[in-house]
Image (spheres, coloured by chain):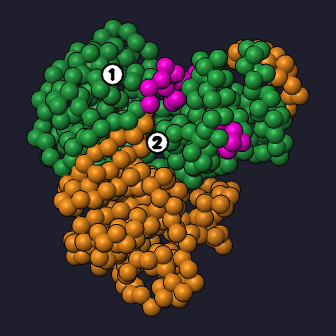
Amino acid sequence: MKVLVPVKRVIDYNVKVRVKADGSGVDLANVKMSMNPFDEIAVEQAIRLKEAGQADEIIVVSIGVKQSQETLRTALAMGADRAILVVAADDVHSDIEPLTVAKILKAIIDQEQPGLVLCGKQAIDNDMNATGQMLSALLGWSQATFASEVEIFGDKAKVTREVDGGLQTIEVNMPTVITVDLRLNEPRYASLPNIMKAKRKPLDEKTASDYGVNATPRLEILKTIEPEARAAGVKVSSIDELLEKLKEAGAV
Amino acid sequence: MAVILLAEINDGELAIDSTAKAVSASMNLGEITVLATGTNCAAAAAQAATINGVSRVLCAEDVIYGKRMAEPVADLIVSLAGGYEHIVAPATADAKNIMPRVAAMLDSMIISEATAVIDSNTFERPIYAGNAIQTVKSDDDKKIITIRTSTFAAAGTGEAAQVEKIAAVADPRLSSWVEDKVAANDRPELTSAGVVVSGGRGVGSEEDFTLIETLADKLGAAVGASRAAVDSGYAPNDWQVGQTGKVVAPDLYVAIGISGAIQHLAGMKDSKIIVAINKDEEAPIFQVADYGLVADLFEAVPELVSKL
């Protein structure tokens, strides 16, 4: 079984986000970028399936600016077999919408015929939480989102999902799209020899138009602003003083 | 212009708070039809019909909607979509599973976790874990929107609108439900609770998390946790407050042993009053707290419990 894993290049999760004063967006120039943390978990899960003999080949795909090839190299160094880069934007500030990403992924999947797609549940930049579900819909496949446990047996997958009240276990027909949540696994670091090896692994470069997909966004971004800051509060010195303040405010 | 709004119903029970908040967010978008789904959802549908602003309720009862699996529910919504310009749901785990699927089937983008409705095409939504707010204008004929309920007041209730039974559509038979593991407790639901008490890594262990629970019970509060506490195994994931967990905005939020990572603040900074207890006076949580107490939580929390 081939496993396809889409990965996104996003601002590193440790970097403090700065909103540009002119309202045009978040400043991404000269900022450390990394693989979306949820996508790392998806790559790790694919590698574990391969190690368990349940997958033969792992294809990683990134859709965005040319620099996304660094993200793909990271996935290759972790253990993916080959990569496809779809260049769909020139400016690092332009985000490709989940619907467009899903359409391009569908075209790739029609060619590659993987038996499973593993993706992160959301990207930490646009926080859409949509690509996996959209891809599943376009393919007419089953979907299992927010996975914290995945077991594949034959033509079914058993997936435990993180839902509002706790955990839900479902069974889905294969092929399927699984979106992964934080607790599924802890991604490995790439070793130096594997980083070197990854440089020689195949990386195909394509464009959105190669797949006949129109990448024009459906949502026009009118402005991006910083959220209102909370006014600084006060420090209290004891529980008694805290209770007094809370009583004054009518909170207890 | 008309709105169809997916009611949050789990095992036949209406989550009236989140549904009524999505109704109030949709009030200016057009006439609101609520869609109730479930194996049995007549009672939930009748209750949803009393939410002010709802003009009718469609009730689709069938065993295939019992656990609200994404594929059959999305198919049902798409089959009804013709008459509506806006398809709305509160941004719960179920809706986040279902609505992007609906959007793609209708060749529309999803507008996730809207925090404000500017006009029928224009919405605000948080990005980068709430570190930026984006205003987006949709060019799609149909707008599919999930509503971040913490930023809207719940619509009230009054005279009941009419409820209409509708037939199920064919089950795509792509997935099946196996089991739910839902923690049973008598505490209020995290996202609609008036008071939330959360513990962080500073609590130190699963055993000591009972300290947080004791205080929560004393205050009639829901229990939350930071991602660090969840990752360390001190608390279950469905208690997680933050970008990757739940977003809450209670009247009172008590953060105990929580440093205040950006990802946690994203989930609670709209709370009315924030109290922080942390022994590290440099902890970023104090920058958003209305009342901060620099203290050892193992002394401060029992004292607080005894004095309440």
Amino acid type, callout 1:
Glu
Which residues are drawn in magenta?
B183-204
Q: CA distance from mark 1 to mark 2?
A: 23 Å
Residue A93, placed above or below residue B98: below
Same-chain check, marks 1 and 2: yes
Under circle 1, the secondary element is: strand
Residue bearing the label numbered 1:
B13
- In the displayed image of the protein, which residue is found farthest to the front? B207
Residue A135 location (% of width, % of height): 29, 59
* Mark toward the start of the polypeptide (1 vs 2): 1
Asked whether the beta carbons under mark 1 and mark 2 sit within 8 Å of each other, the answer is no
Under circle 2, the secondary element is: strand
- Regarding residue B67, the answer to whether it shows in the image is yes
Q: Which one is nearer the viewer's eye here, B138 or B48? A: B48
Residue A42 location (% of width, % of height): 42, 63
Taking the image as shown, residue B243 lies to the left or right of residue A72, namely right
Taking the image as shown, residue A129 lies to the left or right of residue A138, namely right
Residue bearing the label numbered 2:
B113
- Regarding residue B20, the answer to whether it shows in the image is no
Chain ID of residue with mark 2: B
* Chain A visual colour: orange
Report the disc number at residue B176: none
Q: Where, by quadrant of the figure, is residue B98 drawn?
A: top left
**Residue A234: in magenta span:** no
Q: Where, by quadrant of the figure, is residue A108 drawn?
A: bottom left
Residue found at x 49% / y 38% = B238
Q: Where, by quadrant of the figure, is residue A82 drawn?
A: bottom left
Amino acid type, callout 2:
Glu
* Chain B visual colour: green
**Residue B194: in magenta span:** yes
- Number of callouts in the render? 2
Residue B124 location (% of width, % of height): 51, 43
